[in-house]
Image: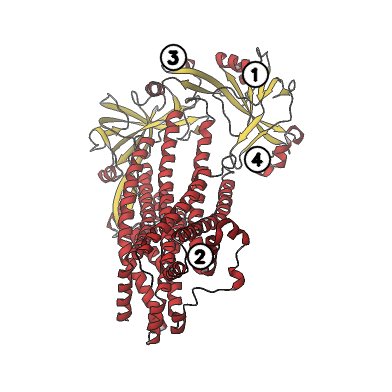
Amino acid sequence: MKILNNLTLKYLKLNKKRSIVTIIGIALSAAMICAVTILTASFQSFAIEMVKLEEGNFQAQIADVGKDELEIIRKNKNIKDVMLTNDLGLGSADGIGNKEKPFIMVKQYDKNAMDKLEIKLVSGRLPENENEIVISKGTSLEEIEVSIGQRVMDGEVVPLYYGTMPNEEFIVENTKTYKIVGVIERPYFENEYGVYISGITYINENENVTVLINTKNVKNIYETMESIEKEIGVSKDISYNRNLLMFHGVSKNENALTFIYTAALVVIVVIMLGSVLVIYNAFAISVSERKKQFGMLSSIGATKKQLKKSVLFEGTILLIIGIPLGIISGIVGIGVTIGVVNNLLMQMMEGMMVDLKLVVALMPILVAIFFVILTVYISAFIPAIKASKISPIEAIRLNDDIKIKNKKLRTPKIIRKIFGVEGEIALKNLKRSKKRYRATILSLAVSILLFVSISGFVTYMLKGSDMYYQSIDYDISIYLRETDEELISKISRLQGIDRSSIIKSMINLEGMDENKLNKYIIENYEDLEMYHPKLEDGKYAVHILVCSLNKEEMDRYLNELGISELKNNEVVVVNKAEIFYPIRAEYEVLNINEGENILEDLKIAKLTDKLPFGLSDMNGNVIVITSEENVLKTMPEEFNMEPMTDVYIKSTDIDTLDKELAKLQEESSFYFTNHVKEAKQIGNMKLIIEIFLYGFIILITLIGVSNIFNTISTNIALRKKEFAMLKAMGMTNKGFNKMMNLECIFYGTKALLYSLPLSILICYIIYNSMQGVFGFGFILPVNSITISIVGVFLIVFMTMIYRKQKNKKRKYN
């Protein structure tokens, strides 16, 4: 066996260039697979850190733990961190918060909880006793008296996530005076849009507490908690940080990482398919080239097993060189990519506390190595079996490589008429070496297929993500918790406003008979049921959004519709609904005409599909535009509420306006969204996706290029005797070059004929699958198709030129 291995090493040294091309193919495969596994691990780590930041750095918690029970928990050998917390409750305090956040949520922490739960100081220090407190918003106060209690409305406790309600009361249960010793950043339990700021004080360990726990091995969390409960001897209220456990892959009821791992596996399989073609062709050609050698070895006693091992040994040598190169390249490449992505993420998520970090762990690298080894040995296995079956007689005759049947070698007469005798010989050359011909065509076709299909997927995804922002005609939207004319006046006087629309609205649910609905709804009811469900009385639900506009925008809107004014009880009805889920559709909702009534006594002055500035709807609603008096008139009597008020602004100076709104928000109760900034963030997200996807396309293309070069280059190298014979028969250099060029054209044309229709079909399937979310016409990836056509012929011709130059330097025997 040692002799066979030495012969294999000598063969690899004698064929350095082809060996290098094969090593490059293995290295590229290893780099791509390693990049996928490292990126998967990095995103998993990023998700874990985000959960820790947003939901707390603990795996489980036990409520209502006494002093003796706490000692049992602390003594458990599997516990890493024990953090003590307690909720004192919601409080109110003079001088704390604002109209938007009028309350304070007071929690007690021990020192370990303050450290492990990442309470970050802005100024001052952390509390050291029960009489000191830190809060999550700046204040000039040094001391506060907090009244702890509950928000109540109509005898019911108001949930924490509700905004301030007009008729709610705050019932005080006890009071406590604290010294303010510091200001902290918003902790994980404080909702950015909630009604309270946060206060953290020091815990009293003599009382029952809530214990937050981290184990030494997260995978044992459930067993550890069960053992603790048994030791305590009493059933405890145990809950888990399920999102954190989910991303650790130890959730009891759901495997959170299934989607991430499945996506990574799909990408790895695609890479393996492309790589197998490159590496398989290299080994197949190697076996073909060494046929005489294997025949001789077989004649002097080499067993089938030894010949098979010789080919697999060749693969092992190439693996040993290719894997380290690929792994290092993959880590460096994905490291650079993550660095670029991090900058974009920082721009997208202002104040983001977590970086996407490169995680170079042993397991992702081992997984990558496993898949690369699998790829190479799959590629080498069939050629190894063929090598083991080569008999001495077969090796001498070489009759297995070229099997000629007269009928199969016939070429259409038109080929000779168009291309001459050189074209006929070129086509016959391809036909008589079918295995090599098919391998080359398959290599070209798969490369084209992968390139066009993935490019099409990128095109459709980016096109779809653009659709939402193309339909928005305003820069900023503002939601007021309650109608405040003084606040609206302040907003309208801010700098940088070009145009503003003040829309007051409320929504009515109406039951409609089937004959009142557009037949499209009935025909597509399965898809539209969530928008127009059947009511108990057999009618169909239709939501009618009744809106009023400020005078300037109402006059402009009516003018666009050709109406001078709306009389009392007259309305404009936008009867066109637009939805994006579960299908993308636009349809008329009601069978209704101008002059008829809607909502009992409101007369339709105009039916239109044009919405006023600022108003958009994707919920299948009928929209009624009317006066503010009519909006109030349609309010159901049982709703003792004001209409919702929204302001939509087109800006001349978005940055200035954004800053002024942020400043005004500190003293008033409203939310606003900067859609220009949001669109920029979406643009950055698209760029991140493009970086990864186009990077993947480039690497797949490189694998394809090395595959094509390796296959064609070696095929030509193996035909040196054939070329010598043609030269001896009188073929001129011009004729020879013409024959070789025509072979290039036949290779490229046939590969394109096979791959392009299939690529377009796959693109259409991808496009079709996206129509449930986005609606746009089928886009043929013309640029990708053009690049693939030019690229294929360019690669084939360059390979042919390279090999012809090499052959000129050889002496034909």
Where residue 112 appears, as percent x and y from the top left, is: 26, 46
The answer to which of marks 2 and 1 sits earlier in the sequence is 2
Q: Give me the disc on residue 528.
A: 4
Q: Which of the 4 image quarters holds residue 624?
A: top right
The answer to which of marks 3 and 4 sits earlier in the sequence is 3
Q: Nearer the viewer, mark 2 or mark 1?
A: 2
Q: CA distance from mark 2 to mark 4?
A: 53 Å
- For the residue carrying disc 3, how many other residues have a C-alpha within 10 Å: few (<14), some (14-19), or many (20+)? few
Q: Nearer the viewer, mark 1 or mark 4?
A: 1
Proximity of marks 1 and 4: CB atoms separated by less than 8 Å: no
Tag 3 residue: 493
Q: Give me the disc on residue 437.
A: 2
Helix, strand or loop for disc 2: helix
Q: CA distance from mark 3 to mark 1?
A: 29 Å
- For the residue carrying disc 1, how many other residues have a C-alpha within 10 Å: few (<14), some (14-19), or many (20+)? some
Residue at 41% over, 59% down: 709
Where residue 103 appears, as percent x and y from the top left, is: 39, 29
Q: Mark 1: which amino acid? A: Leu
Q: Mark 4: which amino acid? A: Leu
Quadrant (top left/top right/bottom left/bottom right) for the N terminus: bottom left
Q: Mark 2: which amino acid? A: Tyr
Q: Which of the 4 image quarters holds residue 29?
A: bottom left
Q: Is residue 216 visible?
A: no
Q: Mark 3: which amino acid? A: Arg
Where residue 111 appears, as percent x and y from the top left, is: 25, 43
- For the residue carrying disc 2, how many other residues have a C-alpha within 10 Å: few (<14), some (14-19), or many (20+)? some
Q: CA distance from mark 3 to mark 2?
A: 75 Å
Quadrant (top left/top right/bottom left/bottom right) for the C terminus: bottom left
Tag 1 residue: 561
| Above or below for 498 versus 386 | above
The answer to which of marks 3 and 1 sits earlier in the sequence is 3
